[in-house]
Image (spheres, rainbow, N blue to C red):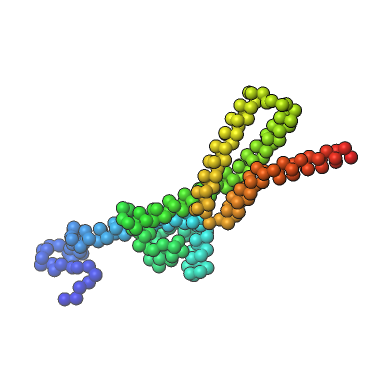
């Protein structure tokens, strides 16, 4: 007997019940096959949820906007994607197709299996570690760039104070004890700040891939070495003499 897509029970098995009613009753009844289908659908939902979450996190961790990702998928792989398409996928408003998921994983430099792995598996833990590492590196670079700029200002503050202190010592054979103590406290605070700044820059130097940050770090080191050298005082003296001569003229 040829089977239709729905299994129709012979009427003699269910007397007085129409074929159509038998179809509904059979299809609605719990069966092992139905339970397996529900389990499969549930698992597929978990995988897709995992993919959406990791797609969002990895995209942001790599500094890629939704527009950036859509542009790569459209221009390089020919998919009709726009920023709104990526947004709808990440929010779960649009299902993700297998070929799309595979391409997105490739663009994010991941395996598809990593993108859908259940929480608690080695693949999920490895991906979580990668995401956390990328995000931490970004934050460290931001902090280091900020610290680098502020340490430049701190060098200038210290230089100006030393210039004022040198003039004070020139006019007084012995410094007032309170002033000397205050100068010592400032130096300790400055050294603590410099040590902390160098520690942050050292962390950034190991993690960073930004050549500009590295160049800025090295420039700060050279600047610090210069202001600590006798040449700095000579240069400042020459500059002050030049300014004085200009004022006299």
For the point 60% across and 51% down, the residue is: 218
Judge from the rendering whether residue 171 lies leftward or rightward of residue 10; answer left or right. Answer: right
For the point 35% across and 55% down, the residue is: 124
For the point 13% across and 67% down, the residue is: 11
| Near-viewer residue (246 or 68) | 246
Judge from the rendering whether residue 101 lies leftward or rightward of residue 191; answer left or right. Answer: left
Give the quadrant of residue 181.
top right
Tally the numbered discs. Answer: 0
Judge from the rendering whether residue 156 lies leftward or rightward of residue 71; answer left or right. Answer: right
Give the quadrant of residue 92.
bottom left
| Near-viewer residue (197 or 164) | 164
Q: Position of residue 44 (x, y in %)?
A: 31, 59
Look at the image and tell me whether residue 23 can be seen.
yes
Q: Residue furthest bottom?
A: 1
For the point 63% across and 23% down, the residue is: 178
Q: Position of residue 105 (x, y in %)?
A: 42, 63
Q: Position of residue 120 (x, y in %)?
A: 31, 53
Look at the image and tell me whether residue 90 can be seen.
no
Q: Position of residue 62 (x, y in %)?
A: 49, 56
| Near-viewer residue (170 or 64) | 170
Judge from the rendering whether residue 245 lies leftward or rightward of residue 147; answer left or right. Answer: right
Q: Residue furthest right?
A: 249
Give the quadrant of residue 41.
bottom left
| Near-viewer residue (55 or 166) | 166
Q: Quadrant of the N terminus?
A: bottom left
Q: Quadrant of the C terminus?
A: top right
């Amino acid at each position: 007997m040829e089977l239709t897509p729905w299994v129709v029970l012979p009427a003699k098995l269910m007397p007085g019940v129409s074929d159509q009613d038998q179809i509904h009753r059979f299809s609605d009844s719990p069966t092992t096959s139905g339970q397996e289908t529900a389990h499969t659908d549930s698992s597929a939902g978990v995988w897709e949820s995992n993919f959406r979450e990791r797609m969002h996190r990895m995209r942001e961790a790599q500094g890629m906007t939704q527009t950036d990702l859509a542009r790569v998928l459209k221009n390089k792989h020919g998919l009709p994607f726009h920023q709104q398409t990526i947004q709808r996928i990440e929010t779960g408003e649009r299902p993700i197709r297998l070929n799309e998921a595979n391409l997105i994983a490739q663009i994010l430099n991941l395996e598809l299996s990593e993108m859908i792995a259940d929480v608690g598996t080695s693949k999920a833990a490895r991906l979580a570690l990668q995401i956390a590492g990328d995000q931490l590196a970004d934050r460290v670079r931001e902090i280091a760039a900020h610290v680098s700029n502020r340490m430049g200002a701190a060098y200038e503050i210290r230089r100006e104070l030393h210039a004022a202190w040198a003039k004070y010592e020139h006019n007084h054979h012995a410094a007032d004890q309170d002033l000397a103590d205050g100068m010592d406290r400032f130096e300790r605070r400055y050294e603590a700040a410099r040590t902390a700044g160098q520690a942050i820059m050292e962390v950034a130097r190991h993690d960073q891939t930004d050549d500009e940050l590295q160049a800025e770090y090295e420039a700060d080191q050279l600047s610090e070495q210069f202001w600590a050298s006798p040449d700095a005082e000579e240069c400042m003296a020459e500059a002050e003499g030049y300014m004085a001569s200009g004022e006299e003229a």
